[in-house]
Amino acid sequence: MSAALPLLESGAAHMPMREVKRRAAAVLRAYPQLTIGGCWGGRRVAATGRDFDYEQVQMVIRFLLTFCERRKTFNEKANSYRLKHCVENWADEMGMPMWISNGAFILAALICGYRDQHCGIGSPNCTFDMSVGPEVHRYDWHVYGRIPGVFTRMKFR
C-alpha cells in the first residue's frame, strides 16, 4: 500500500473535523480493506465512514503532528498497535481519556501522508515510515505495564 495524500507539516497540531472527514473519505476510497480493527487485505467487511469515530482519528492526527516525523525507511517499532496505546496514554495524561482503535490509528497516519506496510499475513497491524520522538517513550506503558525506565525502554528509532 502507499499513502494517498502528501505528508502534512508538523506544527499545526490541530485539524478541523470537516478536514479530517474529507481526507478520511479519500483514504477510505483508496484503502477499501481498512476497518476499525486494522488492515485485513480484503478478508473482512470493507470499511465505511460510519465505522470510524472521527474524534479518535482527530486525536491521533494531533499526536502524529506533535511527536512524529517522516523517515526514509519503515520503522518496525512504530507499528499501529503499539502507537495506538501511546496515543491513549497521552490523551489520558492530557485529561481526555479515550480508547483508540487500531484502524483509527492507521487511518490517521494515512491522512497525515505516511506510507504504510503490513506487519504480516493475517496481521491487522501496519508499520509506517515514521520516526517517533523520544518524549513518546513515557507513553509506551502497554509494553511494560508501567512507565518504562531508562534501562527497560524499547526505543522507537
Image (tube, rainbow, N blue to C red):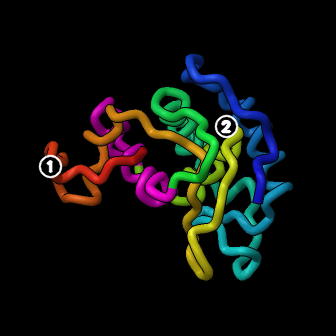
Q: Amino acid at mark 2?
A: Cys
Residue 50 screen position, x and y as percent: 70, 56
According to the picture, the residue beneath numbered tag 1 turns out to be 151
- The answer to whether 130 is drawn above or below residue 99 in the figure is above
Q: Point out the stretch of residues depicted in magenta.
A: 76-98
Q: Main secondary structure of the magenta part?
A: helix
Q: Amino acid at mark 1?
A: Phe
Judged left or right of residue 109, residue 89 is: left
First in sequence, mark 1 or 2: give its number.
2
Residue 61 screen position, x and y as percent: 57, 36
Residue 134 screen position, x and y as percent: 34, 35
Quarter of the rendering containing residue 149 = top left
Image quarter in which the C terminus is found: top left
Nearest the viewer among 102 and 16 is 102
Query: Outermost residue toward the top?
Result: 11
Quarter of the rendering containing residue 87 = top left
| Residue 31 belongs to magenta span | no
Q: Residue at position x 41%, y 57% from top?
A: 82
Q: Residue at position x 56%, y 43% from top?
A: 130
Instruction: Give the number of callouts.
Output: 2
Graded by Cα atoms within 10 Å as few (under 14), some (14 to 19) or many (20 or more), the crowding at tag 1 reads few
Q: Residue at position x 28%, y 34% from top?
A: 93
Nearest to viewer (mark 1 / mark 2): 1
Nearest the viewer among 125 and 26 is 125
Residue 156 screen position, x and y as percent: 39, 47
- The answer to whether 44 is drawn above or below residue 139 in the figure is below
According to the picture, the residue beneath numbered tag 2 turns out to be 112
Image quarter in which the N terminus is found: bottom right
- The answer to whether 153 is drawn above or below residue 118 in the figure is above
Judged left or right of residue 33, residue 125 is: left
Task: Kindly state the secondary structure of the residue where label 2 is placed.
Answer: loop
